[in-house]
């Protein structure tokens, strides 16, 4: 009898499902969720730090608390961030959807 081969992705998903609260589904390594080049994620993270959201169903709480971190940012900074995101998206398209970070 041979054991089925488990990939790390499925094994880690099984462990997380057993021991951790549910996560919002998203693609692994999605360039849309890569926060390294987007400053807003750190602002949101700081605003939500210390808040406990027990279930995904209470997403209204997250939506209410999230804007606190973004309220002090100037409009020009937002525009610059979205232009940078556009450039990142174009670099992803140039390499057929593979995100290379700052290498592209």
Image: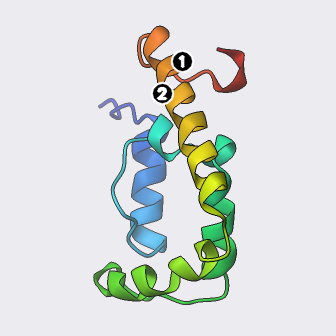
Q: Position of residue 82 (x, y in %)?
A: 53, 43
Q: Residues within 10 Å of mark 2 (few under 14, many from 20)?
A: some
Question: Residue 3, can we see it?
Answer: yes
Question: Quick check: marks 1 and 2 in contact, CB under 8 Å?
Answer: yes
Q: How is the image coloured?
A: rainbow
Q: Looking at the image, how many numbered discs can be counted on the residues?
A: 2
Which quarter of the figure is the N terminus placed in?
top left
Against 85, residue 66 (above or below) is below
Task: Determine the residue positioned at 28% across, 83% down.
Answer: 57
Task: Determine the residue positioned at 47% across, 60% down.
Answer: 15
Question: Residue 29, can we see it?
Answer: no
Task: Determine the residue positioned at 41% across, 11% down.
Answer: 96
Q: Position of residue 100 (x, y in %)?
A: 61, 21
Q: Secondary structure at mark 2?
A: helix
Q: Secondary structure at mark 1?
A: helix
Q: Which labelled disc corresponds to residue 89?
A: 2
Q: Position of residue 16 (x, y in %)?
A: 46, 62
Please identify the quarter of the rendering in which residue 61 is found: bottom left
Nearer to us in this view, 32 or 80? 80
């Amino acid at each position: 009898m041979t054991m089925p081969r488990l990939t790390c992705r499925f094994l880690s998903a099984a462990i997380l499902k057993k021991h951790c609260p549910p996560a919002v589904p998203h693609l692994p390594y999605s360039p849309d969720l890569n926060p390294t080049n987007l400053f807003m994620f750190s602002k949101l993270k700081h605003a939500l730090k210390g808040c406990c959201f027990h279930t995904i169903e209470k997403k209204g709480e997250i939506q209410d608390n999230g804007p606190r971190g973004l309220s002090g940012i100037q409009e020009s900074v937002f525009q610059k961030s979205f232009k940078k995101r556009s450039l990142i998206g174009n670099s992803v398209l140039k390499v057929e959807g593979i995100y290379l970070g700052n290498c592209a």
